[in-house]
């Protein structure tokens, strides 16, 4: 054993000394523990409410995003449909603008091709102007012109019928 422990064992036990009375000293009293605190219920309730509101907000955001996704899909389908319609219209216009289609439409209207073109320059005309041949008078080519002349004056006829009723000067101007 160590020296201090041995010395402490062999030391004489001191007698308790009586303390002198220091005067008016209050007596000891039993201390009552403080009242048990009430459980703070508003804090857990506030946390649950806040968490619930956050989850509800997240749910509403997800629903709005899903609705927007459906709307985007619908708009994309509509856009594709409109693009297809536009392409079909462009193809139809290209088909009607083709030289063969224009030549056949002009023949239906009674137009004939110019025999030799004449070009105008600052120095004068290049080429010799010649008259266009008269179209052959076929019964099928004559019928649209007679039907157009019999069309009512109020303009109720179709555009094709009114185009057939154009004057020969207008037809010649469009042929040039």
Image (spheres, rainbow, N blue to C red):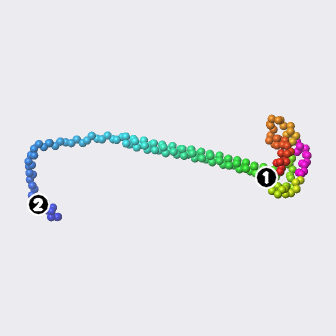
Which secondary structure, mark 2? helix
Question: Left or right: 108 with respect to 90?
Answer: right
Quadrant into which the N terminus falls: bottom left
Residue range (magenta): 131-143
Q: Nearer the viewer, residue 159 or 54?
A: 159
Name the residue carrying label 1.
Answer: 98
Q: Magenta span has 141?
A: yes
- Looking at this view, name the residue that lies furthest to the front: 123
For image coordinates 82% across by 57% down, the residue present is 123
Which of 87/38 is in front?
87
Cβ–Cβ below 8 Å for labels 1 and 2?
A: no
Task: Please provide percent x and percent y for residue 25.
Answer: 13, 43
**Which residue corresponds to the image point at 78% horizontal and 49% vertical from the top-left?**
96
Is residue 108 visible in this depiction of the protein? Answer: no
Distance between the alpha carbons at the discs numbered 1 and 2: 131 Å
Nearer the observer, 115 or 108? 115
Mark 1 nearby-residue class (10 Å; few <14, some 14–19, many ≥20)? few
* Mark positioned earlier in the residue sequence (1 or 2): 2
Element at badge 1? Answer: loop
State the image quarter where residue 168 is shown.
top right
Taking depth in this image into account, of 11 and 150 the one nearest to the observer is 150
Decide if residue 46 is on the left or right side of residue 117. left
Residue 134's x, y, as percent?
Answer: 90, 49
Dominant SS in magenta: loop
Specify few, some or many for label 2: CA neighbours under 10 Å numbering under 14, 14-19, or 20 or more: few
Q: Residue at x 89, y 53 (%)?
A: 130
Which is in the foreground here, disc 1 or disc 2?
1
122 lies above or below 42: below
Q: What percent of the width, then of the height, locates residue 12?
A: 9, 58
Q: Pointer 2: what residue? A: 10
Residue at the spot x=45%, y=42% of the render?
53
Please state if 1 lies on the left or on the right of 169 as rendered.
left
């Amino acid at each position: 054993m160590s020296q201090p422990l041995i010395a402490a064992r062999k030391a004489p036990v001191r007698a308790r000394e009586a303390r002198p009375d220091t005067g008016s000293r209050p007596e000891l009293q039993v201390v009552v523990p403080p009242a048990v605190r009430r459980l703070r219920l508003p804090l857990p309730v506030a946390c649950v409410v806040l968490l619930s509101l956050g989850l509800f907000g997240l749910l509403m955001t997800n629903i709005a995003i899903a609705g927007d996704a459906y709307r985007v899909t619908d708009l994309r389908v509509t856009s594709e449909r409109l693009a297809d319609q536009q392409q079909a219209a462009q193809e139809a216009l290209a088909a009607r603008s083709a030289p063969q289609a224009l030549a056949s439409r002009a023949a239906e209207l009674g137009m004939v091709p110019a025999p030799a073109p004449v070009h105008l320059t600052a120095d004068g005309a290049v080429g010799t102007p010649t008259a266009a041949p008269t179209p052959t008078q076929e019964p099928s080519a004559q019928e649209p012109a007679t039907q157009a002349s019999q069309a009512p004056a109020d303009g109720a006829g179709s555009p094709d019928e009114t185009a057939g009723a154009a004057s020969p000067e207008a037809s010649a101007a469009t042929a040039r």
